[in-house]
Image: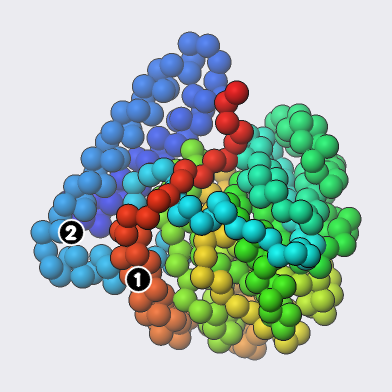
Amino acid sequence: MKPSEQHHLATVIEECRQALAEVAHNGRGQAGQPLDAVAARLQEAANALFVDVRRRQRRSVGARLHHWTTPRLGLLRHHAPVPLRLPNHYFNADPPDPAPTICVVTPSYQMGELLQRTIYTVLDQRYPALEYVVQDGGSTDGTQEVLHRYADRLTSWESAPDDGQADAINRGFARTTAEIMAYLNADDLLLPGALAYVGRYFAAHPDVDVVYGHRVIVDIHDLQIGAWIMPPHDDAVLALADYVPQETLFWRRRIWDAAGGAMDTSFRFAMDWDLLLRFQAAGAKMVRLPRFLGAFRVHGGQKTLVDTVGCVTESDRLRERLHARTMSIEEVHARTAPYMRRHIVHHTAHRVAARVPLPRQLVRTRPADP
């Protein structure tokens, strides 16, 4: 079996293991025990395959070179799950004084347990000028119990039917006034110190309208399975493809208002790219920050994984709107190739730096046990 085929098999097994583990976690009594055993066996098999792939790659100089020079942007699994740890300075970030107000809106529907982790990572930032709104679409899976539990720490929350994710985001932002804006989906995470870092950057750079950073990729158990290391922002590439990690994106209210002041509810998948393109058309100055700001979660219930045709259709629609013609994926890849080469350089530098034995801490996504 080729290493690429073996890696694919390991990925499939790991996805099945995650699904089984989630069922076991939500099960009751004896029903969960055999599923736990199956999930454990699948974990062993997946880890063995990942290890064997790495062993094979180390045997050949050519294979090792290919491994180090393959773009990671667009891929959602890079390695076997490992604990998510960050350097100590992430946990010691201080906001500016005075701190610019930041609002975060979390759209949610049937996310239950994952929503709880998302809320925790936002509130645990302890940012002094935060407006945090959760807009739920009327979930019936225990979400409202989670919202009641955190109600006294949220600026506001609502659980009522809506017209989709974009509509939920618009409803949430309608109840905010903060200068800096962001939305964080109910299955993603903010990383420690993100709000303080972003607030300090905006305070020091009044000419910047939009910022984003690097992305960590996690699985259903909050274990890291990859990372997107972003090269500096490129307006020309944004007009071809959206590689901006949405969970790391923050912008000023002034550019939100200039771009129409609302998410386009006709989009179900590419709403964030549409917003970025409207920011660009309004003259926004965008900057990629050299820091991990958020974590994107890969799990079986994601709509982008379930309906890939919808994602492609909406992306094609935006390219045609912008360029007044259809564009093949081959052309997109060819025109974004220089950006990908820059990404490889930055990603390689990050991998080298990650081997430096700096003090690191485990990222918590829920309160510590009493």
Quadrant location of residue 104?
bottom right
The residue that label 1 is drawn on is 349
Residue drawn at point x = 66 percent, y = 50 percent: 125
Disc 1 residue type (three-letter): Ala
Disc 2 residue type (three-letter): Gln
Label annotation for residue 57: 2
Quadrant location of residue 142?
top right
Whether residue 272 appears in this view of the structure is no
Label annotation for residue 191: none
Residue drawn at point x = 62 percent, y = 40 percent: 117
Could you say where residue 323 lies in the image, as x and y percent from the top left?
Answer: 62, 88
Residue that lies at the very extreme toward the top in this rendered image: 30
Q: Secondary structure at mark 2?
A: helix
Residue drawn at point x = 41 percent, y = 85 percent: 338
In the depicted structure, whether residue 118 falls above or below residue 244: above
Give the alpha-carbon distance from disc 1 to disc 2, as whole Å. Answer: 20 Å
Q: Quadrant of the C terminus?
A: top right
